[in-house]
Amino acid sequence: MDYLSLIKQPIQADLDDFIALFNQSLTYQDGMLGSVLSHIRQRGGKRMRPMLMLLMAKNYGKVSSVTQHSAVGLELLHTASLVHDDVVDESGERRGQASVNATYDNKVAVLVGDYILSTALLNVSLTGSQPIVQELSELGRTLAAGEILQLSNIQNQAISEDVYYQVIQQKTAALFQSCAAIGALSAGASDDDVKKAGDFGRTLGIMFQIRDDIFDYFDSKEIGKPTGNDMIEGKLTLPVIYALNNTEFESMLTLAKKVKAGSINADEIAVLIEFTKQQGGIEYAEQKMAELSQICKDYIAQHVKEKAIKESLTAYVDYVVQRNY
């Protein structure tokens, strides 16, 4: 059985309910708004974040309507942030599909992102849970701050692993942390258990982003972004940061500065990618993932009792490390 099937096994019915509610929330009957929302629904995705929230709820109790509205609210918030991010990054593609801003225009993308964000707030309000409303509101602030930090980091000439992790903490890691924490909250877990669940989610999110960043150094038809896309956008990720900080090739540092300045060309990116591979940048990033994976599995061993949930979460961790798209 493949990893995704193992992950879904104990929550398949709950996941089906989530998908139905999510699609309903992203439906509008008429006009351009209906057309754009339909375009976004077609992306689908693997539903990694909702699955994590459902699994956490089941680990600490059961999946309820509170869990489902929380999951829809968080996934809508994430969806809105992606629509807006594509405008900021001037991205033409998202998950192998034309982005909203590319298909329509920036004005439509911003307004539709606002509509989705408002729908997220509506769903989370239906939980009737002040702690969950607060957690999701804080997440929205954190994601926006993380995007601004990433933009400001492009202007920063320092090539720092610490800053790389700061950006991840306020973007992907924050999303996964909230998924796990809100899932536990929705099932009535104690404050201590909610914190431990959130820590697990944060670690998982860092690992998820490192794997995502590694993809950018290789060609793959399954990946919804071309090789070197991060560098085109002015971003230096963990593999190249390690390679640059552990060698003394001035020519490569010059290329890295061109990445940050937005003046690097495709041939120069290819040189920087090859340099990263030769200097062990990919292996270093994979080693970091292995360390984080062990932290996640320690949590599962200590805080997950039911066999089916334990197997599902273990498959989740393994999938994040080993996925190829």
Image (tube, rainbow, N blue to C red):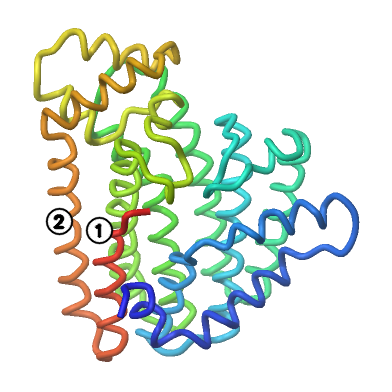
Residue drawn at (24%, 66%), measured in percent from left and top?
A: 318
**What kind of element bears circle 2?**
helix
Given residues 33 and 190, the one toward you in this image is 33
Q: What label sits on residue 166 in the rendered view?
A: none
**What kind of element bears circle 1?**
helix
65 in relation to 298, above or below: below
Given residues 64 and 228, the one toward you in this image is 228
258 in relation to 322, above or below: above
Q: Tell me where residue 248 sits by quadrant.
A: top left
Q: What label sits on residue 321 in the rendered view?
A: 1
Residue drawn at (47%, 27%), measured in percent from left and top?
A: 151
Answer left or right for 61 relative to 99.
Answer: left
Q: Name the residue under label 2.
A: 290
Q: Where is residue 84 in the image (x, y as percent from the top left)?
A: 62, 40
276 in relation to 138, above or below: above
Residue type indicated by callout 1: Val
Query: Marks 2 and 1: in contact by CB < 8 Å?
Result: yes
Q: Where is residue 184 in the image (x, y as percent from the top left)?
A: 41, 77
Answer left or right for 60 relative to 252.
Answer: right
Residue type indicated by callout 2: Ala
Given residues 219 and 215, the one toward you in this image is 219
Residue drawn at (32%, 67%), measured in percent from left and top?
A: 195
Q: Where is residue 162 in the image (x, y as percent from the top left)?
A: 24, 34
Disc on the earlier residue, 1 or 2: 2
